[in-house]
Image (spheres, rainbow, N blue to C red):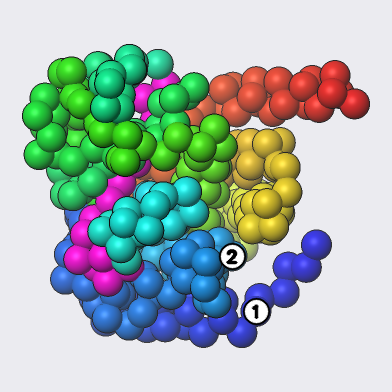
Amino acid sequence: MDFTMTQAQTTLGALTRQILADRKPAKEFDRPLWMDLAKAGVLCAALASSAGGEGYGLLEQCTILSEIGRGVAPLPYATCIAGAASAIARFGSPALVDGWARPAGRGEAVLTVAFPDGTVHTRASPSGIVLEGSCTAVPAGIYADLILVAVDGTGVALVSPSDEGTSVQPQQIAGGPGAGHMCFDSVRVPTERVLADPAAARWLRERVTVGLCATQLGILERAVELTAEHARTRVQFGRPIGTFQAVAQRLADAYVDLQAVRLTLWQAAWRLARDLPCPTEVGTAKFWAADAGHRVAHTAVHVHGGAGIDVDHIVQRYFLAAKYHELTLGGATAQLLDIGSALITAELDA
């Protein structure tokens, strides 16, 4: 396993950071910034390899996502590009690729994903499938032109908000690109808008998960940098607070957590990029991004003291973004149970 950044990763990361540096962070999805990334080729470049041509892939996407996290920009790159558009490019027909994946790469269409986990059910129809149920907190759901609904055992249904029986209500979510509560009342999805490959739903879930972990890495990395700088410059009792043992220990723990997030993310991304089986690696990356994210976010606020709870202070933006990704990825117990199940399955298969 090689953790060395490629030239493409380095270039895309630097370009993304430069574009984000020129913009003030927004609270929700920033469409003008999204279009700036599209014009610079950051969106479409990452789709090239998924669409079967020469270009960039998951590792480059993770580099871009890490920079988006550092810039605390609430953009739906993980769900739109690394997830939905790439899944269509991988499993969809040429018509779907031309109709949705390529426009998403040009910034002309916003795609997102929904993982109902049992709250949406399907039944067969003569022309496709019918969706029934609802899904909460769909990332960027209120802005999406197309939603990929991953239904275990069925595949991935491509649903438009304009489809009869589909409704989207805005939900108040802090730290992310907005959210929508989606309801499906006998929504008919034609066969040509279903990614019926048995591997499609899992493929999509794993890549969105790794994408969220990459974003969390960037958030935590910058939060640790800001906190370390504050500890060096904030003087109390005649000395920098970073020289006090308790503060130094909190910063050291945050650094260790950050390195664990970095290592587990790139391990999972590297294996996924090569289509190697990696359920435990993805689960481990998910665990660390959520669990360590919680600790690092709270360390940043605590070390900043009174400034840390000021909603106008920049550290609050990182705290909210880290909490958003922590809660989106899920609690530690669920991740450990999933990892345990994967290990048991692997042992039985052996």
Q: Which image quadrant: the N terminus?
A: bottom right
Q: Are the residues at dot 2 and dot 1 in contact (C-beta closer than 8 Å)? A: yes
Q: Which image quadrant: the C terminus?
A: top right
The three-letter code of the residue at mark 2 reads Leu
Q: Residue at x 31, y 41 (%)?
A: 192
- On residue 280, the disc is none
Q: Residue at x 49, y 22 (%)?
A: 153
Q: Is residue 246 visible?
A: no
Q: Secondary structure at mark 1?
A: loop
Magenta-highlighted residues: 103-117
Q: Secondary structure at mark 2?
A: helix
Dot 2: few (<14), some (14–19), or many (≥20) neighbours within 10 Å?
many
Q: Is residue 125 visible?
A: yes
The three-letter code of the residue at mark 1 reads Thr
- 350 lies above or below 66: above
Q: CA distance from mark 2 to mark 1?
A: 9 Å
- Residue behind mark 1: 6
Expressed as whole percent of the image width and height from the top left, the position of residue 116 reads 36, 25
Expressed as whole percent of the image width and height from the top left, the position of residue 132 reads 25, 16
Q: Residue at x 30, y 75 (%)?
A: 37
- Residue behind mark 2: 59
334 or 56: which is nearer to us? Answer: 56
First in sequence: mark 2 vs mark 1 = 1
